[in-house]
Image: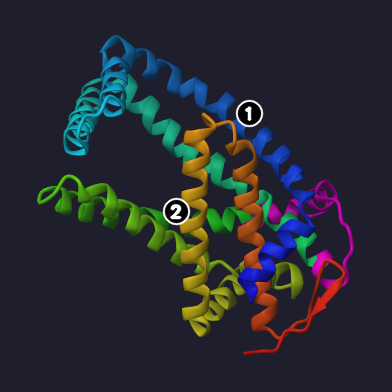
Amino acid sequence: MSFKNAFKLLMSKFRYVWSILLYVTIMVVILVSLGLTFITPVYKMLVAEGVVDEFTTTVNALFMGETLQNAFARLGALLEHVRILLTTNVGAFWNSALFVVLVVVIAYRFLLGLCELPVTSVISGFMNDNSRLSLTGQYLSLIGKSSQFSLAKMLIMVFYDALTTTVTYFVTMLVSSFSIIFAPVTAMTFFIFFTSFRYGLTSAWAPYIVVEKGKIFASFRNSVKFFFTNFTSIFSGYLVIWLMIIVVNVFVAIFTFLAGLIITIPVSMYLVSLYSMTVFYSKKGKSYYIDKEIYVASKY
């Protein structure tokens, strides 16, 4: 029922998607501005070494009917070429490393985390008493706590992501030694599994802070306990949601030449927050509004 109600709230409160889209747009502009400083010299080096032409040839060959096995072999050779270039070119290596650490790991995670408590607060408003809060207003009023929350989440999750990425990489390499075709399937399976588990662990973190006014680290401990207490339903729900998000975004990206991602990305972010809140309210036995109707939750 939490899954179904999350979609009902998505449809009835769809207007907040545009506010999230605005935030994502501003975030992308900031990240691109920061990233260009590091990535531009690396890109110029890759162009000079023919890597960009190799990538174009690989993609064209795939669309011209080349077998998946040959395409993956081409891609593997391309990645190996890039690895050799980065390890032999000190400037390119450090620019790549700084881009990953400063832009992807720190700036991206921090800016994305700043939006989580405001979105949760807005959702709490219309679930509690059908109120219409401003996402911008909540963002400004919660900026201090959001900064602390985002830093805490970044510090904790960077270890989780490093561990799961390492496991996924080595298992994928092991599978690729037997079958190159099953390697990407293995990588995607592990990605969905670890992402669903990650979001399950943190599913009640923001709700505990916003709804129950909890402290940041105490709320994280409560979120972990909440997840394992209701493991089957929460984890399976996130598995379905992330499988659906990946399929929809890939489909839209391919058939709209990336243009449709303007809508599907903020919708995906919003849906994940909505599901976290409907699960939290349901497991806590809290009743909540779905548009003008009240859903009476029973604690289970």
Q: Earlier in the sequence, mark 2 or mark 1?
A: 1
The crowd level at tag 2 (other Cα within 10 Å; few <14, some 14-19, many 20+) is: some
Q: Secondary structure at mark 2?
A: helix
- 92 or 202, nearer to the observer: 202
- Mark number, residue 158: 2
Residue lying furthest left: 178
Please report the residue visible at 88 percent of the width from the left and 71 percent of the height from the top: 129
Q: Main secondary structure of the magenta part?
A: helix
Give residue 87's position: percent from left, percent from top: 22, 27
At label 1, the amino acid type is: Val
Disc 2 vs disc 1: which is toward the camera?
1
In the rendered image, the vertical position of residue 127 relative to residue 79, given as above or below: below
- Mark number, residue 208: none
Give residue 50's position: percent from left, percent from top: 26, 13
The answer to whether the residue labelled 2 contacts the one labelled 1, judged by CB atoms less than 8 Å apart, is: no
Give residue 96's position: percent from left, percent from top: 38, 29
Which residue matches tag 1?
29
Please report the residue visible at 59 percent of the width from the left and 46 percent of the height from the top: 110
Residue lying furthest top: 48
For residue 250, say whether it is visible: yes
Q: CA distance from mark 2 to mark 1?
A: 23 Å
Left or right: residue 241 compared with residue 100: right
**Is 137 contained in the magenta span?**
yes
Q: Which residues are magenta?
A: 125-149
Q: How many marks?
A: 2
Is the N terminus in the top left, top right, bottom left or bottom right quadrant? bottom right
In the rendered image, the vertical position of residue 116 relative to residue 94, given as above or below: below
Left or right: residue 66 compared with residue 130: left
Give residue 176's position: percent from left, percent from top: 16, 48
Residue 209: quarter of image: bottom right
